[in-house]
Image: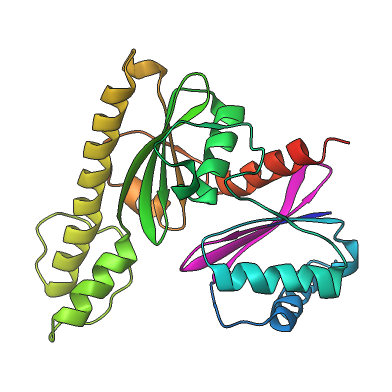
Amino acid sequence: MLLAIDVGNTQTVIGVFAAQMLKRHWRISTQPRKTSDEWALALSELLTINESGLSEISGVVICSVVPEVTQALEAMCSKTLKLDPLIIGPATDSGVKINIDNPAEVGADRIVNAAASMAEYGGPAVIVDFGTATTFDAVSAAGEYLGGAIAPGVEISLDALFSRTARLSEIEIIAPARAIGSNTTDSLLSGIVFGYAGQVDALTDRISGELGGPAATIKLIATGGLAETILDACRTKFIHDPWLTLKGLLLVWNRNNAA
């Protein structure tokens, strides 16, 4: 089985592939202080729930934006699994041509998403990933990664608001029934959900326009933990693929382990 791990600043998504199929997946909080032994224990417990074990893992592929977690996972692979993981970086053969000023700047998850998007849906494409930051990525018809936009994520925006406003308390992010809130909670939800939906619509429209060509030919793909909540409020119609990054990790693994 292949273990695929996508480490974000807030959440870590873990998937297990068998016979090229995603068999299990989990979304857990990212904990930078977790040691290699704690990662081994956590993964063992997750796999045991599904009547599997670490001994069944034959390969590991990782994309990570948190260096401390990358190091702990690499140590766990070496110590516990006796495997050398494929850690996605700027030099990794992803099959995606990175056509930006400094290719080393782009996050591994964004390149993996571009690879999965091209394989699954073709191009040109705009990919919106609702993570700690909300990222917008443009992919050409030829599969080139052209860059994109980065906006503060939904939860970051709320955290900033709560930390600077004494009388506001944290809320669960759900789609409100209407834009005109009749109480503080509904007003907050309206601002964050409908406001974010408007941002997504506007940036997607601008990026699509810059890609050129008929709008109908541009694939619009959304992924990430909060995608479903925001997408329901968007006017733009996206393909919702919650496991896009895991699929991309499988593709890059296969490309680098063709033998």
Q: Residue at x 74, y 36 (%)?
A: 255
For the rendered model, the colour scheme is rainbow
Determine which quarter of the picture holds residue 206. Answer: top left
Is residue 70 shown above or below 199?
below
234 sits left or right of 36 in the view: left
* Closer to us: 168 or 246: 246
Classify the position of the C terminus by image quarter.
Answer: top right
Is residue 95 shown above or below 197?
above
Residue 91 visible within the image: yes
- Residue 181 coordinates in the image, percent (x, y): 11, 63
- Residue 167 coordinates in the image, percent (x, y): 12, 85
* Closer to us: 151 or 50: 151
Classify the position of the N terminus by image quarter.
Answer: bottom right
- Residue 215 coordinates in the image, percent (x, y): 32, 18
Of helix, strand and loop, which mostly describes the magenta segment? strand
Number of labels in the image equals: 0
Magenta span has 6?
yes
- Specify start and end residues of the magenta stretch as a single range: 5-29
Q: Residue at x 25, y 38 (%)?
A: 203
Residue furthest to the bottom in view is 166
Magenta span has 209?
no
30 sits left or right of 140 in the view: right
Determine which quarter of the picture holds residue 55. Answer: bottom right
Is residue 113 shown above or below 40?
above
- Residue 53 coordinates in the image, percent (x, y): 86, 69
Residue 53 visible within the image: no
Q: Residue at x 29, y 31 (%)?
A: 207
Q: Residue at x 57, y 32 (%)?
A: 96
